[in-house]
Image (cartoon, helix red, strand yellow):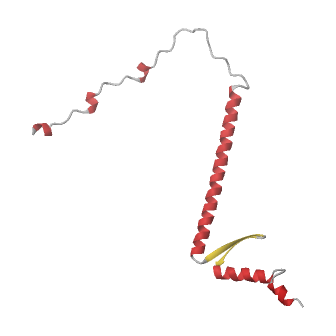
Amino acid sequence: FARCIAPRPSLQAAASPRASPRAVLPDAPEEDDGVSAPPPSEGDDLGDFGLRRGLGVAVDAVIVAWSVVINVFGVAFGLGLLLNISGYGYRVRFDPPSLEISSLARMRQSNLEARYFAPGGAFEELTEP
């Protein structure tokens, strides 16, 4: 019974002390061996880095723009579907720019009138001598 109540030894006490990161890294050479890195030239690494960075920014901009376009079309499609389910519809006109929202019955009637009175429509056929 005493074994069940006795506290267990802590895991931290059982673990060995960790070495500091400085102890793992090798010491830097104390003496100069005469070898040094060449200075960067004007067209080598810096130009490639600038080109890569520029391409990365351009690709990111295209991805963000495409994401915005897809989201706008998705919202427009969802709202159009919601309008149709509830008995309404929409019409986008570009001259002058406008958005018309009305009931489906009214939109059908206006489409019928537009076809009836359009040039070459049924009204012209009825009025010809």
In the figure, 69 relative to 124: above or below? above
* In this rendering, position of residue 129 left or right of residue 89: right
Which residue corresponds to the image point at 68% horizontal and 26% vertical from the top-left? 45
Q: Which image quadrant: the N terminus?
A: top left
* In this rendering, position of residue 5 left or right of residue 94: left
Which residue corresponds to the image point at 29% horizontal and 27% vertical from the top-left? 15
In the figure, 44 relative to 28: above or below? below
The answer to which image quadrant residue 87 occupies is bottom right
Nearest to the observer: residue 50 or residue 105: 105
The answer to which image quadrant residue 12 occupies is top left
Which residue corresponds to the image point at 64% horizontal and 61% vertical from the top-left? 73
Q: Position of residue 25 (x, y in %)?
A: 45, 19
Nearest to the observer: residue 41 or residue 73: 73
In the figure, 116 relative to 95: above or below? below
Q: Position of residue 81 (x, y in %)?
A: 59, 70
Which residue corresponds to the image point at 69% horizontal and 38% vertical from the top-left? 54
In the figure, 125 relative to 29: above or below? below
The answer to which image quadrant residue 18 occupies is top left
* In this rendering, position of residue 7 left or right of residue 92: left
